Amino acid sequence: MILGLALALTRRSSWLLSGPIAIYVSLLRATPVVTLALLVFFALPSLGLALPPVAAAILTLTLNTSAFQAEIWRASFAAFPEGQREAARAAGMTSGLALRRVVFPQVWRASLPALVNEATLLLKGSPAVAVIGVVDLTRAAVRATTADYNPLRPFLAATVIYVLVVLALIAVQRGIERRIVNKYGVL
């Protein structure tokens, strides 16, 4: 999330880096996670950077979600009313202070549902890293089916775990939204 925010802020503030970041985001959003995992795991060693499977999986998922989250943040910043930013500047705030005190709190609240949605998509897309040998929940369920050749229990258990994790993410989101409404009276 932090990398996505940094990409969005850099894209907004630097005309020099805006184009390369837009290309980065577009390429990563268009690349399937499986393909990206294979690219990270097998192509980086040819550049002198060999990663163990878990590190390659973390890098793959980070690169993938950072591109999507950069677009979520970019859209939220673009939708922010310019008049509020101008009012903060007219009140004597520096650009950085206006960003921290006026812009970001509102942009963050507006981005929250989309960020949680992206987190759930990342979670559900994580089995793609199994192609590089990382044992995730789905891969563990596949392995468990070979013990007794009964796929129902392991896959049902994996499904329940995925559902519980996604429901927990949604509960956290709703809790944050309730807290914001109680504190500020508006989401």
Image (spheres, rainbow, N blue to C red):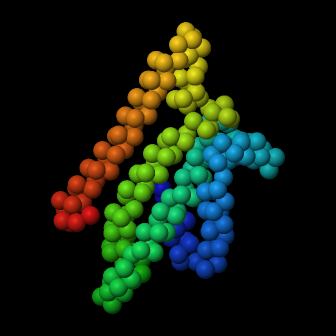
Report if residue 48 is visible in the image.
Answer: no
Q: Is residue 39 left or right of residue 186?
A: right
Identify the residue shown where x is 55% and y is 42%. Answer: 125
Identify the residue shown where x is 55% and y is 24%. Answer: 140
Given the current orientation, which residue lies at the most extreme top position? 148
- Name which quarter of the figure residue 104 lies in: bottom left
Given the current orientation, which residue lies at the most extreme bottom position? 90
Q: In this view, does 6 lie to the left or right of 15?
A: left
Q: Could you tell me how many numbered marks the image carries?
A: 0
Relative to 71, say whether 65 is above or below.
above
Image location (x, y in percent) of residue 101: 32, 73
Given the current orientation, which residue lies at the most extreme right position? 46
Report if residue 1 is visible in the image.
Answer: yes
Identify the residue shown where x is 48% and y is 18%. Answer: 152
Image location (x, y in percent) of residue 146: 60, 14
**Quadrant in which the C terminus is drawn:** bottom left
Q: Is residue 136 left or right of residue 118?
A: right
- Judge by depth and name the residue closer to the eye, 71 or 54: 71
- Judge by depth and name the residue closer to the eye, 99 or 138: 138
Relative to 67, say whether 170 is above or below.
above
Image location (x, y in percent) of residue 13: 53, 77
